[in-house]
Amino acid sequence: MRALKAVKILFIVAVAATFLGFAVKELWNALMPPLFGLHALTFWQAIGLLLLSKIFFGGYHRHGGRPRFGRRMRERWEQMSPEDRERLRQGMRCGRGPFERPAES
């Protein structure tokens, strides 16, 4: 059962990579050489460009990086006493708070 699921995932990844590779290649070749005088890309160069952008910009996240942080903070918040919660609120700097200077007239 797991082998079938792995084969399906590999197939979907291969199809997506092929589609994205051709899309990047066609868009690059349609825009960059006429506009900036750059060389045209091959399919494999387009795949390499996708991988390079993944490394540089870290896109394609499935779940993002924040939900674990939010869940952990919610658990901590629920375990705090009302006094601890108020102390935390007073220490936060969200545009207003204990470090804000009064407006001068």
Image (cartoon, rainbow, N blue to C red):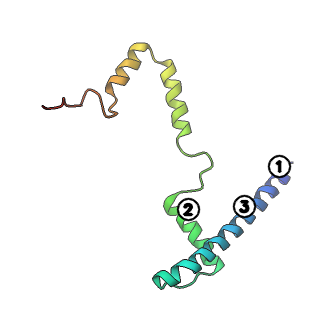
Farthest left residue in view: 105
- Disc 1 is placed on an element classified as helix
Farthest top residue in view: 82
Q: Quadrant of the C terminus?
A: top left
Looking at the picture, how far across and down is residue 90, in whole percent?
32, 23
Between discs 1 and 3, the one toward the N terminus: 1
Q: Which residue is mark 1?
A: 2
Residue found at x 30% / y 30%: 96
Give the side of residue 92 with respect to residue 69, left or right: left
Amino acid at pointer 3: Val
- Compared with residue 54, is residue 25 higher up or lower down, i.e. above or below? below
- C-beta proximity under 8 Å, tags 1 and 3: no
Looking at the picture, how far across and down is residue 22, in whole percent?
67, 73
Amino acid at pointer 2: Lys
Residue found at x 63% / y 76%: 26
Between discs 2 and 1, the one toward the N terminus: 1
Distance Cα–Cα, label 1 vs label 3 = 16 Å
Distance Cα–Cα, label 3 vs label 2 = 15 Å
Looking at the picture, how far across and down is residue 41, in whole percent?
59, 81
Q: Residues within 10 Å of mark 1 (few under 14, many from 20)?
A: few
Q: Quadrant of residue 93?
A: top left
Residue found at x 79% / y 54%: 6
Q: Quadrant of residue 67?
A: top right
Residue found at x 19% / y 31%: 101
Residue 12, which numbered label? Answer: none
- Disc 2 is placed on an element classified as helix
Q: Which residue is mark 2?
A: 54
Q: Which residue is mark 3?
A: 13
Q: Quadrant of residue 100?
A: top left
